[in-house]
C-alpha cells in the first residue's frame, strides 16, 4: 500500500503542479473572454430559461420539444446530483484541513472561471451527441474530443479515463463518505453500510437513465435545500463573526503562514492546488462529465441546455461549498485534526443549537452521496458503451456494486488522493479540446442568445 501511495503522490505532484493550475485557469479565462463574460451577465435570462422554465412546464404538464430521453430539467438535476455530492461536504473539509482556510478562496476563483468552462462542455456534449439504434443518446467529452478534433484514439483514451474516474470519484469516494458519516454518528459497521448502499444503488441503476433522472429530479432539490437552510441559519446567527472569517480566508489564500505558521511547509501553490482540486472534484468544470448526462436531454439546440452549466457551478461551489467552508472556518475546527465528513459534522454541531447539526450533515451526506452513486454509474456506462458497445452492460452494473462494497472499507486519505489524480488526468485532454473547439462554443452561445434573449427582453417589457 505504501508503494501505491508513493506512486500516486508522484503523479499528483505532476498533474496538480503549476502547469496544470495554469492550464485550468487559463482555459477558463480564455472561454470567459470568448463568451463575453457569460457568467457575469444576463442572470435573469439564464434563470428564466432553466429553473423557471422547468417549473412552469412541470406545473402546466407541458412536453419539451426536441430529441432526447429525459427532460431538460431531469438532465440538469441528474447532473446537479452528481456535482452536489461528497465534494460539497467532505471535499471542502479535506481542502481546509490540508490547505487551510485559504483553500476556499481558490476553490471559489476556480469556480468563477469554471462557469464558462461548464457552458462549453454541456454545449459540445449536445452538439456531438449520438443517437443509438435503440433511440437512446450517448454523449460526453469522448465524443466531442473524437469527432470535434478528428481524433478517435484520443476519444478512446478519454473513455478509459472515464471508467476509472467514475469508479474512484463515486463508487469509492461517495461510499466512503457515507460510511464514515454513519460510523461517526451511530457506529454503523462498514459491512452494513456496504450492503445497504449496494442494494439500493443496484435497484436504481438496473432501471436505466429514465429511472436515474426521475430519482435525481425528486431528491436533488430537497437535499440541497435542507443543507442550504442549515448553513444559512449558521451564517445569519453568527453574522458578526463572518467578516473576520472572510478576512482569514483571503489572507490565508496568499499567506499560508498565517494559518500554519510555516511549520507545515504549506505554500501558496499548495493552497491553490487543494482549493482547485477539491473545487473541480465538486463542480466538475473542466472534466466534462456533466456533458454525459446533459446529452440525454430533450432539447432543440445545444445552447438551450448549455446555459444550465454556469448555474450548476454557481449552486454547487459559490453557494453550497462556500457555506460548508465558511461554517468550518467559523467553527475554528479546520485545524482540530478532524478531516472529511467528520470535520463538517463537527462544525455544524458546534455552530447549531443543540447537537443536531451532525444529523443534518449525516442526512445530506447520505442523499448527496446516494444520488452521486446512481448518477456516476451513468458516466461509467457511457464510457463503456463508447469503447465496447452495449455488450457486457450487466457486467458493468455488477462491477459498480462491487466497487461500492470496496469503497466502504477504503482509507479516507488514500481515497481523496487517488480522486485528485483521476481528476487531474482527465482534465488535460478535455481542456485541450475546449480550446480547440472554442469557435464552436461561441457559435452555440450566439445562436441561442440571438433568438432567445430578445424574447426574454420582450417578455420583461410586457
Image (cartoon, grey):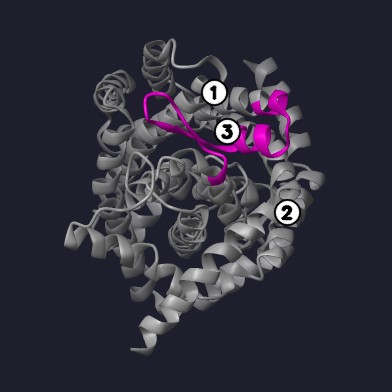
Residue 450 in sight here: yes
Query: Which residue lies at the image location 71% right of the left edge and 23% below the top edge?
Result: 153
Q: Secondary structure at mark 3?
A: helix
The tag on residue 42 is: none
- The residue under label 2 is 27
Query: Residue 209: where, in percent of width, then height?
Result: 33, 33
Separation of disc 2 and disc 3 at Cα? Answer: 22 Å
Query: Residue 335: where, in percent of width, then height?
Result: 55, 51
Asked if disc 2 and disc 1 are in contact, CB closer than 8 Å, the reply is no
Q: Nearer the viewer, residue 252 or 124?
A: 124
Query: Is residue 286 rendered to the left or right of residue 399?
Result: right
The tag on residue 386 is: 1
- The residue under label 3 is 419
Query: Which residue lies at the image location 18% right of the left edge and 62% below the top edge?
Result: 59
Please give the range of residues in magenta. Answer: 127-155
Mark 1 / mark 3, whichever is N-terminal: 1
Amino acid at each position: 500500500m505504501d508503494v501505491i501511495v508513493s506512486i500516486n503522490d508522484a503523479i499528483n505532484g505532476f498533474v496538480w503542479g503549476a502547469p496544470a493550475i495554469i492550464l485550468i485557469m487559463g482555459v477558463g479565462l480564455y472561454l470567459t473572454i470568448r463568451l463575453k463574460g457569460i457568467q457575469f451577465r444576463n442572470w435573469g435570462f439564464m434563470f428564466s430559461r432553466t429553473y423557471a422554465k422547468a417549473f412552469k412546464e412541470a406545473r402546466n404538464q407541458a412536453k419539451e420539444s426536441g430529441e432526447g430521453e429525459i427532460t431538460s430539467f431531469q438532465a440538469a438535476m441528474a447532473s446537479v446530483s452528481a456535482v452536489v455530492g461528497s465534494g460539497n461536504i467532505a471535499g471542502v473539509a479535506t481542502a481546509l484541513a490540508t490547505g487551510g482556510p485559504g483553500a476556499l478562496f481558490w476553490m471559489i476563483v476556480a469556480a468563477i472561471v469554471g462557469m464558462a468552462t461548464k457552458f462549453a462542455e454541456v454545449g459540445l456534449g449536445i452538439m456531438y451527441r449520438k443517437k443509438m439504434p435503440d433511440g437512446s443518446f450517448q454523449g460526453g467529452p469522448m465524443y466531442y474530443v473524437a469527432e470535434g478534433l478528428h481524433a478517435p484514439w484520443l476519444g478512446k483514451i478519454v473513455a478509459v479515463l472515464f471508467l476509472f474516474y467514475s469508479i474512484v470519484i463515486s463508487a469509492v469516494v461517495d461510499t466512503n463518505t457515507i460510511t464514515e458519516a454513519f460510523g461517526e454518528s451511530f457506529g454503523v459497521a462498514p459491512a452494513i453500510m456496504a450492503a445497504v448502499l449496494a442494494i439500493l444503488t443496484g435497484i436504481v441503476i438496473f432501471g436505466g437513465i429514465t429511472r436515474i433522472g426521475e430519482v435525481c429530479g425528486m431528491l436533488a432539490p430537497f437535499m440541497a435545500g435542507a443543507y442550504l437552510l442549515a448553513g444559512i441559519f449558521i451564517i445569519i446567527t453568527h453574522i458578526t463573526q463572518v467578516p473576520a472569517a472572510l478576512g482569514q480566508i483571503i489572507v490565508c489564500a496568499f499567506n499560508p503562514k498565517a494559518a500554519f505558521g510555516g511549520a507545515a511547509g504549506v505554500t501558496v501553490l499548495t493552497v491553490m492546488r487543494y482549493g482547485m482540486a477539491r473545487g473541480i472534484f465538486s463542480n466538475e468544470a473542466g472534466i466534462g462529465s456533466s456533458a454525459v448526462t446533459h446529452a440525454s436531454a430533450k432539447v432543440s439546440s445545444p445552447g438551450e441546455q448549455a446555459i444550465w452549466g454556469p448555474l450548476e457551478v454557481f449552486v454547487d461551489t459559490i453557494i453550497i461549498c462556500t457555506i460548508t467552508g465558511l461554517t468550518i472556518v467559523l467553527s475554528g475546527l479546520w485545524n482540530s485534526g478532524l478531516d472529511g465528513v467528520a470535520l463538517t459534522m463537527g462544525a455544524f454541531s458546534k455552530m447549531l443549537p443543540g447537537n443536531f447539526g451532525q444529523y443534518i450533515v449525516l442526512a445530506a451526506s447520505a442523499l448527496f452521496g446516494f444520488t452521486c452513486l446512481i448518477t456516476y454509474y451513468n458516466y461509467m456506462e457511457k464510457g463503456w458503451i463508447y469503447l465496447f458497445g452495449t455488450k457486457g452492460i450487466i457486467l458493468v452494473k455488477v462491477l459498480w456494486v462491487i466497487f461500492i462494497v470496496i469503497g466502504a472499507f477504503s482509507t479516507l486519505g488514500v481515497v481523496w488522493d487517488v480522486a485528485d489524480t483521476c481528476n487531474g488526468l482527465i482534465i488535460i485532454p478535455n481542456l485541450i479540446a475546449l480550446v480547440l473547439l472554442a469557435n464552436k462554443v461561441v457559435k452555440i452561445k450566439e445562436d441561442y442568445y440571438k433568438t432567445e434573449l430578445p424574447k426574454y427582453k420582450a417578455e420583461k417589457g410586457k
